[in-house]
Image (spheres, rainbow, N blue to C red):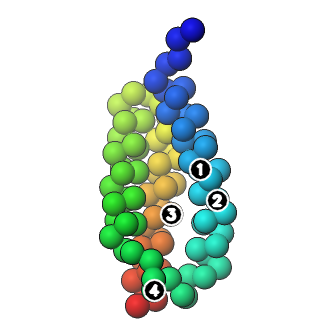
Amino acid sequence: MSVSVPILLDLGNILFFLGSLPQLYRTYQRRQKLRDLSIMSWLIHIFASICFFSAGVLSGAWFTMAVNGFNVSYAGVTAYWINQAR
């Protein structure tokens, strides 16, 4: 049985997206108290999501592109909130 790379990318992105929803909700609720979070880790997260977004574009895995476009936005907003909380 052969599984294509775009299908694995989509499956991984679905799991990553569903796993990040509880954290997204909690981050939004506590956005005024994010001083203890590392802004560097969120910047690395943004860079990684941009890489996955690019891989989605290049391989034609449009779901990967969409989910990681959301991840870039989410991580960017979180980095902004961390900076504002300092």
Quadrant showing the C terminus? bottom left
Residue hosting label 1: 17
In this rendering, position of residue 79 left or right of residue 24: left
Mark toward the start of the polypeptide (3 vs 2): 2
Position of 37 relative to 18 (above/below) = below
Secondary structure under the numbered disc 4 in the rendered image: loop
Give how far apart the Cα atoms at labels 2 and 1 are: 6 Å
Between the C-alphas of marks 1 and 3, the distance is 11 Å
Quadrant location, the N terminus: top right
Q: Which residue is mark 3?
A: 74
Q: CA distance from mark 2 to mark 4?
A: 21 Å
**First in residue order: circle 1 vs circle 3:** 1
Q: Earlier in the sequence, mark 2 or mark 4?
A: 2
Q: Name which residue type carries label 4.
A: Arg
Question: Which residue lies under the disc numbered 4?
Answer: 35
Residue 20, placed above or below residue 82: above
Q: Is residue 56 visible?
A: yes
Please rate how many residues cluster around mark 4, counting C-alpha atoms within 10 Å: few if below 14, some from 14 to 19, many from 20.
some
Tag 3's secondary structure?
helix
- Tell me if 84 is positioned left or right of 17 in this view: left
Separation of disc 3 and disc 2 at Cα?
10 Å
Amino acid beneath label 2? Leu
Label located before the other in sequence (1 or 4): 1
Quick one: SS at disc 2?
helix
Residue 63 in view (yes/no)? no
For residue 1, side relative to residue 46 (left or right): right
According to the picture, the residue beneath numbered tag 2 turns out to be 21
Q: Amino acid at mark 1?
A: Phe
